[in-house]
Image: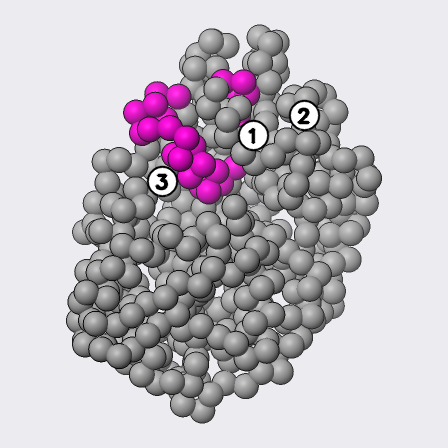
Amino acid sequence: MKHAWKGTVAAAVMTAALLTGCSSPAAPDAASGPAAWPSQSTKLDGVTLTIWAAQNSNKTPQSVIDGFQKATGAKVNVVTIPDPYEQGVQTKVATGDKPDLAFWQPTASELTSLNATQTLQSLDGAPWVSKYTAGLGDMTGQLNGTRYAALVSSPAVEGVYYNKEVFAKAGITSTPKNWDEFLTDARLIKGKGVTPFYDFGGGTPWATQWWVQVQLADAAKAGLWDRVNTNQEKFTDTTIQTAVDNYNGLIKEGLFNSNLKTATFEDQGKALLAGDAAMTVQVNSFFGQLQAMSDTKTLNDKIGFFPISPKGNMGTFIPDQSNALVAFKTGDTNREAAARQFLEYWMGDGYADFVKAQSTVSIQQGVETPSTVPDALKAAAAAVPTSVGSMQALAVANPDLYLNLGDMIQGTKTPQQVTEATQQQFASLAKAQGAKGF
């Protein structure tokens, strides 16, 4: 399964390459203003659109494609880009290979990595933006005031998925209201002979960073990433270093699964559903795994969700590539218009069928969330309006924090070496992007 929150050293190289690119003179850009929005039902006989998708998003648009092709006569092909998805897309775009549309993480750092002003169509004036619920239209999808991404599903939220039955057996009758209560419950559960937390260090340990980021939620709200972005604060300084130290301390205390070094993402879902572990800090894609393993009634009975932060229950939002799409400047004005029309259809006539087919929370006023959506997924979506942005959402670059934390789990890096390596890479990426202070 692909996860869009991974950084890479290669991003610095890709960013530099993208900055040398040129936009087609036929393609609209932010300076010349947004292009017109065609009618959803405009006939497109003979037009073929290509969508790039990751391995975990290549089935997502199928109901939309079916409806759009029937309504317009267009043909839409989905091409799966092998993992690591972001690196693959960046490499192709840097060499001039572009699709009409692509799934993409709608954060400023990831839009920058595609050199959005040169490679992507402006989506300003999109007719569906005013229909977003809970202020989602202003939360993500923009870079320097221009909209480049269409959010199609609720942004992922870092928070705690927990087994209700394990909580009940431990005598816990309400979810924790802050980090201290969270740890108190974990220690109580351990005393009952059940593993409190489940994480994984085997393979690609992308979820390790959530443990650090939820501890930074209050600091993020107070401007942490603004300071990091301008080199006024570093990963090696007290705030982030303490979060890494705390995570390492919980591991040393024995609050995690004993097979932490070798466990995988698939193991995590099985353990939580079976009650072999009480809690895991995860994002929406994790719940997709649970949905594939069980039915809505069982999930409602067994699995709950709550956001967590040091001082309270503030979530940390992190929109991923499966949540949004971008439209490329291809130089073919007919296909560019058709790509915009496809997005308009998706968020217009096709949206109700989309949320039903995906059994996902609606983010559009006037379109009800299907009854088949489990309560925990609804709770995660409900946490979005009061959440704060993650590193990926608010930082100017996305370093490989998760890989460095994985090394810490394996014993090849100390907590101090984790932050040192992350800071060094972040500074390199920020400098390549021209960020001030680097």
Disc 3 crowd rating (10 Å Cα; few below 14, some 14-19, many 20+) is: some
Q: Are marks 3 and 2 in contact (CB under 8 Å)?
A: no
Q: Which residue is mark 1?
A: 267
Q: Secondary structure at mark 3?
A: helix
Does residue 131 appear anywhere in the picture? no
Comes first in the chain, label 3 or label 2 = 2
Which residue reaches farthest bottom? 25
Which residue shows up at 68% across the image and 31% down it? Answer: 262
Q: Which residue is mark 2?
A: 259
Q: Which residue is mark 3?
A: 382
Question: Mark 1 or mark 3, which is nearer to you?
Answer: 1
Instruction: Identify the disc placed on residue 341.
Output: none
CA–CA distance between discs 1 and 2? 10 Å
Residue 422: give x, y in percent of width and height. Answer: 73, 52
Q: Are marks 1 and 2 in contact (CB under 8 Å)?
A: yes
Which residue shows up at 75% across the image and 41% down it? Answer: 407
Magenta-tinted stretch = 275-302
Does residue 390 appear anywhere in the picture? yes
Viewer-closest of 40 and 108: 40
Q: Secondary structure at mark 2?
A: loop
